[in-house]
Amino acid sequence: MYIGLDGIPLNEPRTGVGHYTLELARALAVCSPSDEFEIASPLPFLPLMDQESEEHLPPNLSMVQVEVNALSKHWWTIGLPRYIKRKSFALFHGTNYDVPLWKRCPTVLTIHDLSLLLYPLTHEPGRVRRARRRLPLMASAATMIITPTMSVRGEVCAHLSISPEKVVPVPEAPRDNFRPINAAWSEMTRKRLGVEDEFVLFVGTIEPRKNLRILVQAFALVSRATGARTQLVIAGKKGWLTDDLFVELKASGVAERVLFTGYLPDEDLCALYSSCMAFVYPSLYEGFGLPPLEAMACGAPVIASRIPSLVEITGPVARLFAPDNPQELAQHIITLLADEGQRRHLSMLGRQRAAEFSWKQTALKTLEVYAEAKERG
């Protein structure tokens, strides 16, 4: 088969969906060498890292920037359907909520989460309006739908009125380069970034759904209760609707102990994951939650909010708390700061849990979905 994948998520610095798109495409090509895969986009791709560069991609995987004119720049309605017909794709996979509405071949749609519909106040109004208008159309138009967890599968069926037979949960995975880093390299990275020896870490886009206000409140409680000079490190690009967070931080009394690093490359993240006292993920809602698995793969003890997707993914090896309860989160942090034995135990369990997920498994399950989509036509 000649299979197309949406490359638009690779037009900007990669976060969750961008990593999903590239890692899935590479694993698909490796697992199915008799098929051809193309990542197509009307926009230019950002350069890949050296170890990911196009010459290092599998020979049956290509990245194509499609030339568009005044008409075909309307990508989802005109440009992509025309391109699919010209390239004779046997199937097209929309990896980021969109598929062409004019069906030229069977389509598979990945719906990563329904946060725009279920938590609209954590997003900008324009994006919420677009999702309310387009997502039901896309879900209906797709031949098959992939979700990253069973919990999102249930939400898609319930809120978009989709038959359960059409929706398949396919877990994602931490990338192979997320593994424990030696202490000397971690120390060099921390010094360069201004990170102190004892720190609690968060990784993700800074936006309301990540619930960082509760993390700041909990961190202030930890500081007052212990007098410890632990640092809170928040790594990730600034997103949207962040004013409330910075108001909370200013009032917390611990602003000087909080470091915002901005977006970091993988090697820096690995160094921080490998040396933090605890990784905290206080999100209000997730479709999957890759950062906790990345942290576990690097040996970080993980504290996460008790929400369905994170319970499903982290299993019994993370300390869980109610996402509206800073006191419960603070107590977990205090316990781990004081107990090296428990940190080591969680580190061991976390590495074992992360090893249960792989992009090979993700690709093989995705190929099964492709086969069913082809049968359904």
Image (cartoon, rainbow, N blue to C red):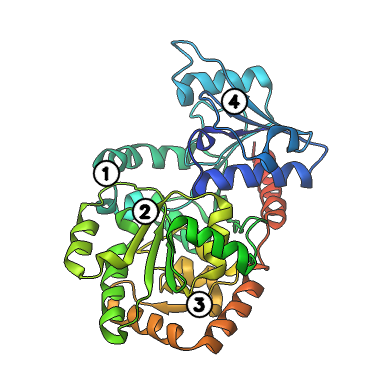
In depth, the one of 196 and 146 nearer the eye is 196
| Residue 124 - label | 1
Determine whether label 2 and label 4 are within 8 Å by CB: no
Q: Residue at x 32, y 86 (%)?
A: 226
Q: Is residue 216 left or right of residue 156?
A: left
Mark 2 / mark 1, whichever is N-terminal? 2
**Amino acid type shown at disc 1:** Glu
Mark 1 / mark 3, whichever is N-terminal? 1
Q: Secondary structure under badge 1?
A: loop
**Amino acid type shown at disc 3:** Ala
Classify mark 2: residues with Cα within 10 Å, few (<14), some (14-19) or many (20+): some
Classify mark 1: residues with Cα within 10 Å, few (<14), some (14-19) or many (20+): few
In depth, the one of 303 and 135 nearer the eye is 303
| Above/below status of 259 relative to 106 | below
Determine whether label 2 and label 1 are within 8 Å by CB: no
In the picture, the quarter occupied by the C terminus is top right
Q: Label 2, on which residue?
A: 115
Q: Residue at x 32, y 53 (%)?
A: 207
1 vs 4, front mark: 1
Q: Label 3, on which residue?
A: 318
Mark 3 / mark 2, whichever is N-terminal? 2
Residue that protrudes farthest toward the top in the picture: 70
Q: CA distance from mark 1 to mark 3?
A: 31 Å
Residue that protrudes farthest toward the right in the picture: 34
Q: CA distance from mark 2 to mark 1?
A: 12 Å
Q: Residue at x 50, y 33 (%)?
A: 11
4 vs 3, front mark: 3
| Above/below status of 357 relative to 97 | below
Q: CA distance from mark 4 to mark 3?
A: 45 Å
Residue 56 visible? The answer is yes
